[in-house]
Image (tube, helix red, strand yellow):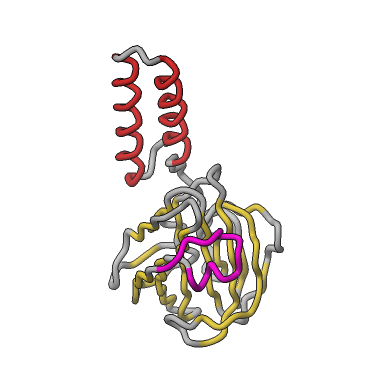
Amino acid sequence: MFQFAQEGYPFIITFAAFTAVAALLRIHWLTAVFVILTLFMFYFFRDPDRTTAPEKNAFYSPADGKIIVITEAKEDEILHENALKISIFMSPLNVHVNRAPCDGMVREVKYFPGKFLSAFKDEASIVNEHISMLLENDKHGRIVVKQIAGYVARRAVCRVKPGDALKQGQRYGVIKFSSRLDVFLPLSTAVKVKSGDKVTAGETVLGTIK
């Protein structure tokens, strides 16, 4: 089913209204600009259905985009321990709806104000505005998914709260415009992607664990 992220409707409606006003005023060049912007909003906030094959030992990508980091790193905000960090960069052309990498119970959702550096920069994971979600899986323990605002993207939305249960591949949030998402997985995870790979939320397996 073709649909749009609910967070996109204010943008779509606003630019459609600007288009209508410009058309009524017969300002043709401005009408053309707002038509293009309205169409872009439709495109950007698209939210296609995805088929996630249930796999208890797999972690699916929580975002569409390109793998830019795969490393062991300490997650200092919630886990306070080393984990496998996989970072995904989302361009303005990617679908920006985020999905759960595995089944789990939401234990924490924390908002951190910060800067708006380019999402490609390593320090963006630490200093940029972001929302971190702790997802606890019965079998594999604690996983952190971090929605990070970038130079263009200045707003992340997490739709869930502590106590909510998520299913693997279930939508849980969105980041508006280009941005980055970091996921922290158990160190025993066998990585199934490499830097530069294009991934699809809810369909690409990032790694597996026994």
Asked if residue 128 lies in the magenta stretch, the reply is no
Asked if residue 124 lies in the magenta stretch, the reply is yes
Q: Residue furthest top?
A: 26
Quarter of the image with the C terminus is bottom right
> Residue 27: percent from the left, percent from the top?
37, 15
78 over 11 or under it: above or below: below
* Identity of the residue drawn at 35% across and 69% down: 111
Q: Is residue 69 toward the left or the right of residue 176 in the image? A: right
> Residue 116: percent from the left, percent from the top?
47, 61
Q: Residue furthest bottom?
A: 81
Q: Is residue 116 toward the left or the right of residue 186 in the image? A: left
In the foreground, 33 or 73? 33
> Residue 93: percent from the left, percent from the top?
55, 42
In the foreground, 116 or 149? 116
* Identity of the residue drawn at 56% across and 48% down: 91
166 over 43 or under it: above or below: below
* Identity of the residue drawn at 57% across and 81% down: 83
Q: Is residue 163 toward the left or the right of residue 122 in the image? A: left
118 over 93 or under it: above or below: below
Quarter of the image with the N terminus is top left
130 over 189 or under it: above or below: above
> Residue 175: percent from the left, percent from the top?
43, 54
Q: Is residue 193 toward the left or the right of residue 50 in the image? A: right
Taken as a whole, is the magenta stretch helix, strand or loop? loop
Residue 38: quarter of image: top left
The range drawn in magenta is: 114-127
